[in-house]
Amino acid sequence: MKIQSSPVELLGAMGKVYLVGAGPGDPGLMTVKGKTLLEHADVVIYDALVSPSILAMINPNAERIHAGKRRGNHSLIQEDINALLISKAQEQTVVVRLKGGDPFVFGRGGEEMEDLLRAGVAVEIIPGITAGVAAPAYAGIPVTHRSYSSSVTFVTGHEHAGKYQPQVNWQAIAQSSDTIVVYMGVHNLPHILESLQQGGLGPETPIALIRWGTRPEQEELVGTFATIVQQMIRAEFDAPAIAVIGNVVNLHGLLSQSSPSIHSIPCPSAKEN
Ligand code: SAH
């Protein structure tokens, strides 16, 4: 790899940072490569959305640091996390930066990798299964389907903390994508639906919200643009959730009859917790 062939840049950093995707929650959806790194880690710096059964895979002798970020509750700011990763790479051999889902899908993995490389620290990415695919799948919703959807867009519904100032061109997405998967969209959902309707989607457009997808506490709400906000209020539905929009949502009724049982895959280390 390019990084290993330029050792001069790595002076001062003995370790390597592995940006590992933890997947959406079900421990059976963690990659073999990611699990092996957790078992051999010297230090693991993890985010709020990483599930307890994944944390149970961490080498018991490893140092664990919660760098978690949830709306309104930022434990460490991004600059601190980057500085921490750099300093840990100078002290330890295997530094795991563990993130929910996939690190490069709305996970700031790209930013962290840039900073680490600029500081001369070796980094490797281990992708994870992103919630935008797995949560719908566990709810019986395929994000593409030959009869209903030839395209899918992953989009963030939370662009500016505190204030909704959309940079996303929702109208263009409404017109061009069969399936729309919205991350971090719960709090701005009324605005998002309004913008998509301005783009031409009608009030009968199917939408599903999946909260804590692939975890034992997974919850789903299925409705239409006309009904979903009221359903959310009635159910006191909150983040973290994925919103899936489009005709694929209509498959939920049939396909969810055989949705995966979340603990069907034996995971001995998860049982310890
Ligand atoms: N990197 C992550 C996404 C981080 S952004 C990934 O690839 O999945 C955080 C948002 O992801 C949450 O607000 C929510 O919209 C979504 N999310 C993460 N885990 C989830 C889960 N288990 N179920 C539903 N949504 C989830």
Image (spheres, helix red, strand yellow):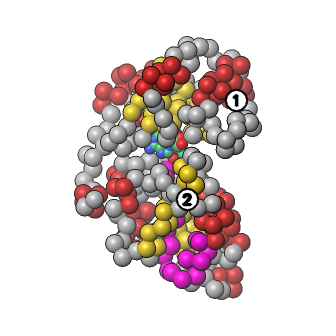
Q: Secondary structure at mark 2?
A: loop
User: Sequence order check: which comes first, mark 2 or mark 1?
Assistant: 2
Hey, what amino acid is under mark 2?
A: Ser
**Residue 90: quarter of image:** bottom right
Question: Percent from the top left, x then y, of residue 169?
Answer: 73, 32
Which residue does the numbered mark 2 point to in the structure image? 75
Query: In the rendered structure, which segment of residues is drawn in magenta?
Result: 84-101
Locate residue 138, reporting x and y percent: 38, 36
Q: Residue at x 41, y 30 (%)?
A: 220
Say whether residue 62 is visible: yes
As drawn, 194 above or below 258? above
Neighbor class of circle 1 (other Cα within 10 Å; few <14, some 14-19, many 20+) is many
Q: Secondary structure at mark 1?
A: helix
Residue 2 included in the magenta stretch of the image: no
- Please give the residue where the numbered disc 1 appears in the rendered image: 170
Q: Quadrant of the N terminus?
A: bottom right
Residue kind at label 1, given as amino acid type: Trp
